[in-house]
Structure formats: structure tokens, C-alpha cells
Image (spheres, rainbow, N blue to C red):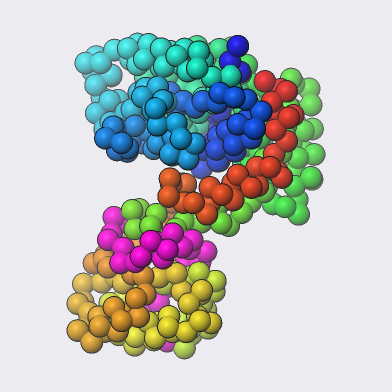
Amino acid sequence: MCKKIFIAATGQHCGKTTTSLSLLHLARKKYNRVGFIKPFGPKRTSYLGKFVDIDAALIAHVYGMDDQLELMSPVVLDSHTTRDVLEGKIDSQKYLEQICHATNELEKKCDFLIIEGAGHTGVGSVLALNNAQLAKKLDAPVLMVAGGGVGSVIDALHLNLALFRETGADVRMVLPNKLIKSKRENTLHYLRLAFEETDIQVVGGFNYSPILANPTMKYLSELLQLELQADQHQASCIVHHILLGGASTQRIIELLQESTLVIVPSSRDEVLVMLSTLYHLSEFKDKIAGLVINGVAPLTEIVQRVIDDAKIPYMRTAVTTAEVYTTIQEDVAKIGADDEEKIALIQQLAESELDFELIDSLF
């Protein structure tokens, strides 16, 4: 009989995919046949010539599940899906049938199956496919991923748990993620107190990690929809700090920290030349992740030659500094299939920070 765990969350960016990656990594040491499904995917990507959910593509790539790809991503939404359902052009029941069929097929092939929901509990309600409805329909007990605080996390949990109670789905565990290491035990203590009169177990998840939380240069290029001038190693560099290049050249140098992305107006020739020159020096190379050169003013030929000669990673855009900075700050980086450093770290941390035997026993 296949063991199923439905991974839900109180919202986006809580760590559902990180949790899925981790549990699959640990489960493969105990179970012979391990599987994954993202019942419906709100974020599509092209992988092996097929449109699938981005998380399904990631899991398939990391764990060699390409042969199960169609079952792993049975329903992929596009920009018209919601309107077509509301206008009666599409019967959402057909989506549920596709999801149930794919899940049933994977249950036959697997001893352990992760079912990853989308967004917060209510996502998919317009299609009658929200996380609570799917968990109940698929008869899969729920692991709820949450943030790493106390008050706001408890509020968010109760808001989301209401939908699961409404459908009668079985929520067995809360996994707080992104815990501050120095406050981990204290945070878990209070969260456990909040749920001590329920059947829901609170089990500690990952501590906060800048490496997992912060974006790579390649991710930022995709986010900003800009071409990245960099080699593969530079593209995979994780950006830990963002610096606006509006200050004096000397002040910008003083403010550089480990792996800093500098947003520099194209009119600041002296800053661009100085950063490119510093990139040649070993003591500064690790401090400069790359540049976003913004503004409508064209680069002079000599400045462009200096940048190219330094082989400093950069992106070029005409938009304002404020637009670039706001776009980056409002986004939370998702893990991509080529984020090998992050994936390796997740698997390493899973073995030390997650109690798989406890989690497994609860399901």
C-alpha cells in the first residue's frame, strides 16, 4: 500500500518545494519506490518538450523521474483557464478526473508518494480544486508547512486550517520553516502549546538559510527578463546583498559585502569602471556577484570595453533603479533545476534538521 503525504502551506514561499525535495531525498533511503505529483500547476514551464508545472520539472530532473513526468503534472493551468471555467467553456470536473487518474497510477507504482499543493489552502478554489478539496478527494493526510514565527504563524495556520476542517481533510502535522536558529526551540515550544489540544503535531523544519532564501544571478535575469552576460559558474552565483550604485565611488566600494549585486545607472562611468577593475582582484571578486546597468543613457565604447575585458557578470536594462530594486525585493527566489548548490544543501540539511522517522510515523 502506498503511503501518501499531501504538502500544503499557509502561503507562497513557505518552503513546500524545499520540503518535498527533502522528504523525497530521505524517503529514498527507506522506500524502494518513491514518487511525486503536483496535481495542478499554476506555473508552467517547458521540460523535455512538454508543458508541465515548474516544481514537477524540478523534482523529475533532480530525482530521475522523467519517465513519470506526465503523471507528475496532470493539470497545468494557463492564463485563460480561470476565465474559461467561470464562463462555462471548461468543466473543472475533467481536471479532477485527470488528477485522480494520475494519482491512482502513481499509487500503483510507488510505496511513498508526495502530493504537493499550490500556494495557500484556498488556491484552486475557482476550479473546485483547492488544497483542502484535493487532500480530501485523494484521501491523503496533510503536512502543513508554515513560517518560522509565533503569533503571525498561528494566525495564518488557523485561517488555512478552517478550509481543511470544512472539507473533512486529515491535517496531521505542522512543519514550521525558516526558523531562526537561536530561537528555534523557543518558537517550537510556543507553537506546540498553541496546538496541544488538537491532534496536530508540530515538528521543526529548516532553520533560516541565506543560501536557500537568496536568488542566483540566473534567477534574477529570468525575473527581470534580461539577458545575463556571464558564464555558467557566474550565473549560478547566489546574491546575498543588493547595493544601489548612486553614492560616491569610494562609498560604494566601502559598502560592498559578500556576493553583492550592484544596480548602477549607465551614466555612472566612474563606478562601472571601478567595479570592473576591482573584479580582477581576488579580495573583491567574491564581493561582486554582478551588475545591473540601468538607464537610457548608452554606455560609452571605452566603458563597454572595460566591462567586457573584466568579464564581470552584468545585465542591461532601460528601466529605473527603483523599478529594478522593487522587482527584486518583492520577489522570493524559487529553487530551479540548475541550482545545484541549493539542492545539495537542502539534501544535506534534511539529514540533520528533519526528523524523517518521526514525520514518517505520523503518516
Residue 276, image quadrant: bottom left
- Residue 228 included in the magenta stretch of the image: yes
For the point 25% across and 80% down, the residue is 304
Location of residue 132 with respect to 185 vertically, above or below: above
Q: How many numbered discs, if any? A: 0
Location of residue 62 with respect to 167 vertically, above or below: below
Image spot of residue 24 (x, y percent): 57, 33
**Does residue 4 appear in this view?**
no
For the point 44% across and 59% down, the residue is 236
- Residue in the foreground of this view, choosing between 279 and 67: 67
Image spot of residue 17 (x, y percent): 52, 38
- Residue in the foreground of this view, choosing between 195 and 223: 223
Image spot of residue 63 (x, y percent): 49, 36
Location of residue 44 with respect to 227 vertically, above or below: above
Image spot of residue 137 (x, y percent): 50, 11
Residue 92, image quadrant: top left
Q: Quadrant of the C terminus?
A: top right
Residue 45, image quadrant: top left
Q: Quadrant of the N terminus?
A: top right
For the point 65% across and 42% down, the residue is 350
Lateral position of residue 173 relative to residue 244, left or right: right
Identify the magenta region: 224-249
Lateral position of residue 152 relative to residue 192, left or right: left
Magenta span main SS: loop
For the point 54% across and 71% down, the residue is 258
Location of residue 184 with respect to 141 vertically, above or below: below
